[in-house]
Amino acid sequence: MRTVNFHIKRYDPARDAKGTSRVEAFEIPYETSLTVLEGLFHIQEHQDPSLSFRYCCRASICGSCAMYINGRYRLACQTNVLHLHTDEVHVDPLPHLPLVKDLVCDMDDFFAKYEYVQPWLQRSSQEPAKEILQSPADRHKLNMPIDCILCGACYSSCPSVWTEDNYLGPAALLKAYRFEVDSRDEARKERLPRWDNERGVYRCHTIANCIEACPKELSPTEGIQWLKMAAVRRRLFGRAK
Amino acid sequence: MPHHQLIVVGGGLAGLRAAVEAKASGLDVAVLSQVHPGRSHSSAAQGGINAALANHPDAHDDTPEKHAFDTVKGSDYLADQDTAIQMTKDAPGVIFEMDHWGCPFSRFDDGRIAQRPFGGAGYPRTCYGADKTGHYLLHTLVERAYERQVKMYIEVFVTSLIVDEGRCRGVVAYDMINGGFHAFTADAVVMATGGAGRIYGNSTNAIISTGAGAAMAYHAGVPAEDMEFIQFHPTGLLTTHILMSEACRGEGGYLVNGEGERFMARYAPKAMELAPRDITARSITTEIIEGRGINGEDYVHLDLRHLGAEKILERLPGIRDIAIHFEGVDPIEEPIPIRPVQHYTMGGIDTDVDGRTRLPGFYAAGECACVSVHGANRLGGNSLLETIVFGRRAGMAVVADLEGGSAGGGDVSAAGSAAVSAMEARVAELASRGADGADPYAIRAEMIATTRDYFGVFREESVMRTGLETLRRLKERCGGIGLRNAAGVFNLDLMRTLELEGMVDLALCVAEGALARTESRGSHSRTDFPARDDERWLVHTLAYYTPEGPRLEHAPVTLGTFEPQERKY
Ligand SMILES: Cc1cc2nc3c(=O)[nH]c(=O)nc-3n(C[C@H](O)[C@H](O)[C@H](O)COP(=O)(O)OP(=O)(O)OC[C@H]3O[C@@H](n4cnc5c(N)ncnc54)[C@H](O)[C@@H]3O)c2cc1C
Ligand code: SF4
Ligand code: FES
């Protein structure tokens, strides 16, 4: 029977000093459709029940299983071992984030920053009795940012996040962009001070690691650059749009 | 011990909608969820959500009544007609509200919400956001929950109910991030933990869709209703069982067998590929059994190629990505290999039209509940609708009941501590057997193979008897399970071991219900009893927990508006 080797970065707060970790190797049976997530389950069920990792949908839509696999940001459920073209599979948690255990990182800051940009549609107009009309062209502007699954890969990959704790990071700013370009939203002015500052868009130096990292092939950088221009336009012309 | 007026277990669409509703009325609400709410299984829904908006040019005379009729007919007349009527009546309002909250529905040229045809529906009334409707709806409600400042306990795994003096007063849960079991007490609890698809070995559902909430309710004495009705979706990906949405056929996709024939012409000449799911799943299975699968194997093709690249990229981009990543097939170039797989749990916690159960203080909504609007077969697009309509109604019912003074009132900390101690004792017992005890993963593997192989699309007494015997044996083995890793944080072994027995109990409800029901209705199709038997079986099944296995009772179906007829499509 063919096998592959999983090399997994382990950290257990009950046993390892903060900031340290170990790598443990597991040999597991291989079949053509094996995904990295299935490999992790095989280990948890049959070799080491104490292995910890996040999962839910196994269909690349819930954003639970972003990890650093063979030198790249990937969703474990979407990564077929076959496509790694090697029998040695190295699985690390998202780099540069504090760890909870093994492949599970602490996402509290990530979600606090998401919440900070007030990622909800805000309106003051009287709501119509039916839907708020939106042209297909206006709806089209949302296509890219609404596909974000909040997996955190971009956030983990961004050097500006590594060096500045306060930086909101690519995912939260992409969310700000998502509402900035929604024709139904009426709080652009109110939301602006949350991202139009050093904590926000000006901390992005267009290194574009986030684009490379994003498993959904989104471009937070593009959204951030758009926001920068919107802020300038607003200053120069005083317009809301 | 944290106390809230309302605890909602589950951060999917149903749970969040209940929480947002109750919070808006001023209740102190907390959501407990084993994953961040935005990661709930609802995010995987693809095709859309039904409401008679009459936005589609071919649907200008659509109405909630017609939607109700399609729902009841689709259910093979087992749905309670009053609840189906209520759901379809509430539908347009809740959809418009989701739009006002920012849900990015796809649009028609005139700016109105776009709608597409779906199976079993007389009109194109399925509202959608490309093929990621669940993801868009869920993120919209997550955003609203943050805006309303609903308290969220994230990565908290609920294991049992706290019942005190005949009322539900909270839950016991394992704190995945910090470790340990804690009581979360409340004046009311809404269960919204989603479906139980993972009791089957071939499910489209998320890995965490294990039926935990339904099992907890069942153990607390609330009956599980109509559990034998398990929906098999016609089009699951061959290797991974990941769903290829009904929207593929709604947009015009074909089902083709090994002889290159659009075989649905033989089973549903009018509706063709858009027949309801039970009929379509049976048709595919029949093709496979009769040797007309692709190359004689156990799958057929879902062919989208004639739709063209532009339409596929605009309407079905997520489907295309999934087919490429998980099956290595680009639907623009090649047909997709598919077969019927477990998809939806029509049964669940028995509730009324406002989510109330027989246990005071305990409510349920969403896929874990059985209201029942889906009866013996759910229509595509009605489940997302159910989560939002009945999540909202459960939230309103809690507010009304607590205001009406039916709150638990008394101090519940003693009951809370006792429930935590009981859970700790259970864990200690499991841990004491350790690696010497029965292997929970071996039991799980055998259970999911048994449900898949013995309680599938077609059912027959002798086969089911064998399956039931196996499940009973597995239930017995659950008594001797060993837990190998009892301590620490993010302990998957602990959670997966604790949830197992509940999964086996629900599988037993499916099995006993299916064996007892000597007729064919909706998704429950018996080769030995091929006809529907309204005389004897136009009734709901209620399964009550006993240590010896489920005790079945029957309850009448609410009729009154639509006369049961033969289903033709
Ligand atoms: C692939 C797929 C596609 C679908 N597409 C459609 C569609 O197009 N249209 C349609 O109408 N329906 C569709 N459905 C059905 C629909 O998506 C589901 O029925 C619906 O989303 C269920 O929502 P819910 O809120 O009841 O539960 P879920 O979204 O499953 O949420 C359950 C919640 O409970 C929590 N939870 C569970 N157990 C515990 C526990 N023990 N402790 C703490 N928390 C717990 C989870 O963390 C989660 O937050 C689809 C289903 C699948 C599988
Ligand atoms: S932008 Fe991409 S990488 Fe970043 S959180 Fe969203 S999906 Fe993940
Ligand atoms: S498990 Fe949901 S994205 Fe991988």
Image (spheres, rainbow, N blue to C red):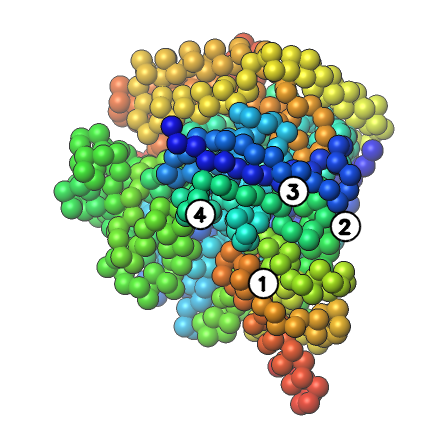
Which of the two discs, 4 and 1, sits closer to the camera?
4
The residue singled out by tag 2 in the image is B26
* Residue under numbered circle 3: A104
Write down the chain letter for disc 1.
Answer: A
Q: Secondary structure at mark 1?
A: helix
Q: Position of residue B412 (x, y in %)?
A: 82, 27
Q: Is residue B185 above or below residue A111?
A: above
Q: Is mark 2 within 8 Å of ligand 1?
A: no
Q: Looking at the picture, which amino acid does disc 3 mark?
A: Val
> Is label 4 on the same chain as label 3?
yes
Mark nearer the viewer, 1 or 2: 1
Chain under numbered label 3: A
Which of disc 3 and disc 4 is earlier in sequence? 4
Instruction: Give residue A62's position: percent from left, percent from top.
Output: 54, 48
Q: Amino acid at mark 4?
A: Leu
User: Do dots 3 and 1 share one subunit?
Assistant: yes
Viewer-proximal residue among B216 and A78: A78
Q: Which residue position holds label 4?
A: A84
**Does the CB distance between marks 4 and 1 fall below 8 Å?**
no
Disc sitting over residue A210 in the figure: 1
Residue A6 or B86: which is nearer the viewer? Answer: A6
Foreground disc of the pair 4, 3: 4
Q: Is residue B271 visible?
A: no
Q: Residue furthest bottom?
A: A237
- Chain bearing mark 4: A
Asked if badge 1 and badge 2 are on a common chain, one would say no
At x 47%, y 70%, the residue is: A140
Quadrant assignment for the N terminus of chain B? top right
Q: Is mark 1 within 8 Å of ligand 2?
A: yes
